Amino acid sequence: MAQFINELGDFNKIREEINNWTLSSVSKDRADPMEMVKLSSGYAVEQFQWLSYHKALGMIEDKDLQKLCTRIGFQEEEHLSRLGSVVDPNMTPMESALALQMTAIQAFSEAGQLETNDICKSTYDYILLDHLTQMKLLSDSASRMGAEGGVISRIMESFGAGAAPKMGARPEEITKGAIQIREGRPIEKQFIPTDDIIKQSLSKDTVPVESFVNVHTVLANDVQLRDEYHLFRRMMPSEDSRRLLNIVTAIENIHVAMLESLMDPKTSPLEYLMINELMEIKTHRQGIQFAKSDSARSAHEYALREDEQHLNWLRDAYSSYGSPAKFKATDKLFALPQMSINEYVNQIAAAVA
Ligand SMILES: [Fe+2]
Ligand SMILES: [Fe+2]
């Protein structure tokens, strides 16, 4: 087994090792928009999985398994450090808030297109419409603050012909046109009764693992958005923006509850962690496809390599309890959406208009 950071035995070695966790950041003026979105998504899934390992410790009895989770947790911490260090530290909270909306819209539009389970698909399409409105309200607020243009308009432009990550697509196919910042579901209709929030849970015996990977991926992205907004609203001097973020995070609790209610409560901690590893592998594979800078590419590549190893360790541990056959990264997991984000968003918005 690899050497883990806390087991190197010599603090100088540990510090030297941790110094490698900070890569050079990519300036927001030069960053490629899809690269930014995929970095943000990679960070979200890493944070989600890091927390899952820590939570799992209190849910499993086996001491060896607890040790394995602790060790892997250290590596997830490293992945977070590396990916986070690539993001330009000069991004303002408003720019970051908008980038997180873009990341969520991309994730829901991809999951909505690839999903084969009807309950999941309708949930993703529902949430996508809420995010469109949030995006519009935030970008209006950014314009009032004089923060339009720059990195945000470049991200929006890239969503025009969209982010369908087609293999071999020419950059101009991916980046032409601009996303229409349009209203999705009116904000006053986004607060819905609790009875409508809780969904019928999926059965792990009949629903394919790819569907669970989709749920975990959009959940990780939404949780990240909500948690970072909790932080941003304490950093923004504008009272208007803070109030807007309060409304958005209140609604995000609805989305998070919807997605969590889809989970099969019979999923064991080990199964949950394997689904998360598949989510990490899928996200980093895409991250590499869209990386333009050496920093972003190497952060995704490094994480991918170790996450593949994590999945192998977990599958070995799981084989004492059941068959790990379905917890495997197959071509089905790496399917790509056919439509651009803009095309898909327009289709979904038209269906409810
Ligand atoms: Fe990871
Ligand atoms: Fe991992």
Image: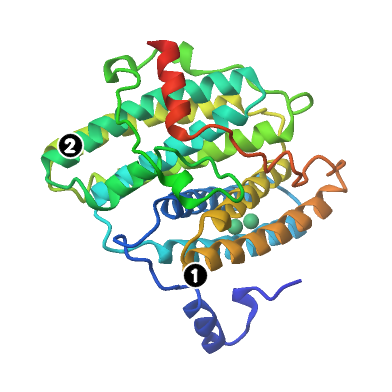
Q: Tell me the kind of residue under disc 2.
A: Ser
Ligand 1 within 8 Å of the CB at mark 1: no
Image point (76%, 44%), residue name: 330
For the C terminus, the quadrant is top left
Q: Residues within 10 Å of mark 2 (few under 14, many from 20)?
A: some
SS type, badge 1: helix
Residues under labels 1 and 2: Cα distance? 34 Å
* Residue at disc 2, secondary structure: helix
Q: Amino acid at mark 1?
A: Asp
Disc 1 to disc 2: CB gap under 8 Å: no
> Residue 9, can we see it?
yes
Foreground: disc 1 or disc 2:
1
Reading the image, the residue beneath label 2 is 141
Determine which residue is flagged by label 1: 294
- The answer to whether 99 is drawn above or below residue 184 in the figure is below
Q: Quadrant of the N terminus?
A: bottom right
Label located before the other in sequence (1 or 2): 2
- Where residue 350 appears, as percent x and y from the top left, is 41, 15
| Left or right of residue 211: residue 107 | left
Relative to 3, residue 34 above or below: above
Q: Residue at x 46, y 20 (%)?
A: 347
Assess disc 1: are there few (<14), some (14-19) or many (≥20) residues with their C-alpha within 10 Å of its C-alpha: few
Q: Indicate which quadrant contains ligand 2.
A: bottom right
Question: Residue 297's spot in the image, x, y percent?
Answer: 53, 64
